[in-house]
Amino acid sequence: DTGVSQNPRHKITKRGQNVTFRCDPISEHNRLYWYRQTLGQGPEFLTYFQNEAQLEKSRLLSDRFSAERPKGSFSTLEIQRTEQGDSAMYLCASSLGGYTGELFFGEGSRLTVL
Amino acid sequence: GENVEQHPSTLSVQEGDSAVIKCTYSDSASNYFPWYKQELGKRPQLIIDIRSNVGEKKDQRIAVTLNKTAKHFSLHITETQPEDSAVYFCAATSTSGTYKYIFGTGTRLKVLA
């Protein structure tokens, strides 16, 4: 499968713990996005990278959230000191650079904070 | 800030009827408007998109229209089939700016057989 892959697919954690999600984009894609989706809502923008540079981060994102994309390949999203409100599906998507618009989504990482 | 509003939130139609979903965007710099379909438990997938230099685009049973002046765009599905049942999301972005895609809140379409 050469699509976007995310892991773990499911994560259950206790409040206050740290969690990290990984995303492997389609290999030739230089843009990588993180979105959060809760039940009945559309994907909410968190941050995005062009190659290894993090170009924008949502103002809604607290300092507990951090993302990296070393060497412009895979990306990690870390949530520190998790809260119950962080429970959601975390979606990663990638796209080619330039004028091409299509986002290719991964299957998501579902976080449950107890 | 940027915002995309989507209506209705749920839509039920009889098989064979048409369905229309509408979105309004706030950022006048937006010039690319994709529509994604998300089936239960699956990832969103692009079904059609439109750029700001055209007013309408059609692909078999689905079409999208864009009114730049009013800042709204719509998805039209004709001759609906049960397999069209899913959640549909509109989005808007600027391909000359930050490439940040803002999604609508989604429309759950149910096609009744």
Image (cartoon, rainbow, N blue to C red):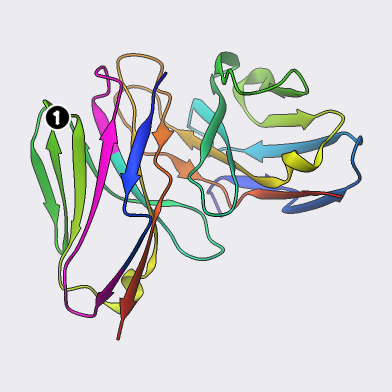
- Say whether residue B12 is left or right of residue A83: left
In the image, A10: left or right of B57?
A: right
Q: Residue at coordinates 16% horizontally, 68% vertically from top-left?
A: B18
Is B1 covered by the magenta stretch?
Answer: no
Q: Could you tell me residue B75's position as x and y percent?
A: 21, 51
Residue B28 falls inside the magenta stretch: yes
Q: Residues within 10 Å of mark 1 (few under 14, many from 20)?
A: few
B95 left or right, relative to B70: right
Residue that label 1 marks: B70
Residue A42, placed above or below residue A53? below
Name the amino acid, label 1. Ala
Residue B100 position within the rendered picture, expressed as x and y whole percent measured from the top left: 43, 24
Q: Residue at x 51, y 45 (%)?
A: A105
Above-or-below relation of A109 to B27: below
Quarter of the N terminus of chain A within the rendering: bottom right
Helix, strand or loop at label 1? It is loop
> In the image, what residue occupies the spot 89% across and 40% down?
A15
Residue at the far left in the pictured view: B55
The magenta span reads: B12-33
Q: Hey, which quadrant is residue B105 in on the image? A: top left
Q: Position of residue A43 (x, y in %)?
A: 51, 41
Rendered position, B18 above or below B34: below
Which residue lies at the image location 38% right of the left edge and 28% below the top edge? B3
To which chain does the residue with label 1 belong? B
Q: Of residues B25 and A101, which is closer to you in this image? A: B25
Task: Give the side of residue B100 with respect to residue B25, left or right.
Answer: right
| Residue A74 location (% of width, % of height) | 66, 31
- Residue B34 lies in what quarter of the image? top left
Circle count: 1
